[in-house]
Amino acid sequence: MSVLLSGGGEFAFVLLTVAKELKVLPKDFVDLLNVVIVLSMSATPFLGQAGDALGKWLQDQKPASNKSDMLAPEVVKDQEQESSEKCENCVVVCGFGPVGQGVTAILERSLGIKSIVAFDLNPARVLEAAVSGLPAVYGDGSSPKLLESSGVVSPRAIVITYANLARRLQAVEQLHAAYPSVPIFARARSEQEREKLLEAGAQIALAEFSEVSCQLASTLAREVYRESIDTDAVRQHLQAGGGVFSASPSGMLDDDAPNEDLPTDIDIDMIVMDSGMSRSEVLRLYRIFRSIDLDGSGEADVEEVRQLLARNASSVANDKQLQEWMNQLDSDQNGAVDFEEFLSVYRGKEPA
C-alpha cells in the first residue's frame, strides 16, 4: 500500500499551478516537479506489481502464524466453544410471532425441550426473545444455508408458523427438499391452505378453525357438562372435510353422495379457485344447498326455504323475515337463489 501511495496525483498539478502564479515557487522548479509527478504516475502500475512481489517475499520470510495468536486466550476459547456448539436433533421454529412463541414456550415448559431454535425476520421479535432468554436467530428460517450456518444439524422437527401463506409454502418446499426425512408441521388458516401445505411437503398442517372449534367445544364440555370430548377424533373429522354439519338427523345430507350428481352447469373446480375454499368444503355446501332446493331445479325459492324452516321448530321465521333473507341471498333479484349466490353469502361476502 505504501508503494502505491508514493506516486503523485492530479491534485499536485493544481497546487503547483497556483504556487507558480502566486510566485511562491520559481517557474523552472515548478516545471521540474511536474515532470517528476508525471513520471511517478506513469510508474504506478509497475510499482504495484513490485509491491505485490515484495509483500509475498516478506510473508514467506515470516514464520507461519495463526490468527488466533493475535487474540486473547479467553477470546479464542469462546470462539472455539461457539464453533463447536451444534444444534443436533433440535426443533426448528420458522416465525417467532405469537404462534411461534407459544409453540416454543409449551415445548420448553411442558416437555422440558431445550434444543429449540427459532428464526424470524422481525428484529423487534428477536430482541424480545433475547431479553426473555428465548432462542431466536435473525434471518429467514426457510433458508437451509442459514440453518446450517446457525449450527442446525439434522433437525428433529420443523414448525412453520409464518402468517403469510406464500412464505409458509416457500418454507415448506425448501426445507422439505433439504431435509426430506424431517417432519414438518405447518400452520394453516383454512382447509384450502392446509391442502396446499400438505401438497408442498408438510407432514401435518393444522387449520386454525378446527383447532379453535375443538378447544372451545372441549372446554365447554369439561366446564359445563363435566365430560370429555375426543378432540383427536373431532379434529380428524373436521380436517377430512366433514365440516360442522356433515350429517343431518333428518337424513337430508349424504356425505357419500357421488360427484356425478353435480349438475353440468356448475364448475366446481372454478368455484374452488374463486372462493378460496377446499373442494371438499364446496361439495359439502352444495349438498346442503341441494337439500334446500327441494324440487331439484338448481334454484331455491321462498316457498322451498319456508318448507325447510318449518321442519325445524327453532328456525321459525315470519313472512317479513323470509323476504329479508331472500333479498340478501338473491343477488340478481330473480325470485330464486342459485348455488353460487348461496355460497357467496355463506362466505360472508356480498354477491357479485
Image: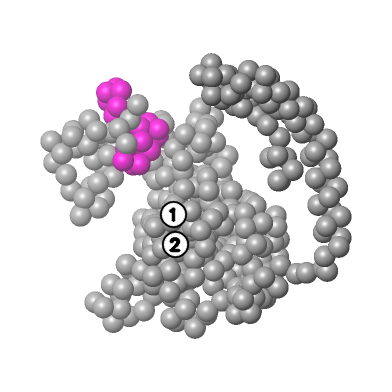
Residue at x 36%, y 36% (from the top left corner):
344
Considering only vertical position in the picture, is 261 above or below 121? above
Q: Is residue 101 left or right of residue 197?
A: left
Which one is in front, 86 or 272?
86
The percent position of residue 208, horizontal first and vertical second, equals: 42, 58
Q: What colour scheme does the image use?
A: one colour
Amino acid type, mark 2: Val
Q: Secondary structure at mark 1?
A: loop
Look at the numbered discs 1 and 2 and tell me whether their residues touch, using CB distance below 8 Å: yes
Which one is in front, 243 or 7?
7
Crowding at dot 2, Cα within 10 Å, few <14 / some 14-19 / many 20+, comes out as many
Q: Is residue 343 left or right of residue 140?
A: left
Residue 183 in the magenta stretch? The answer is no
Point out the stretch of residues depicted in magenta: 330-348
The label number, if any, that marks residue 122 in the structure image: 1
Cα gap from disc 1 to disc 2, whole angstroms: 7 Å
Crowding at dot 1, Cα within 10 Å, few <14 / some 14-19 / many 20+, comes out as some
Q: Secondary structure at mark 2?
A: helix
Q: Which residue position is annotated with label 2?
A: 126
Residue at x 30%, y 32% (from the top left corner):
350
Query: Is residue 17 something that shows in the picture?
Result: yes
Amino acid type, mark 1: Asn
Residue at x 44%, y 54% (from the top left corner):
122
Q: How many marks?
A: 2
Q: Quadrant of the N terminus?
A: top right
The percent position of residue 215, horizontal first and vertical second, equals: 36, 68
The percent position of residue 70, horizontal first and vertical second, equals: 67, 70
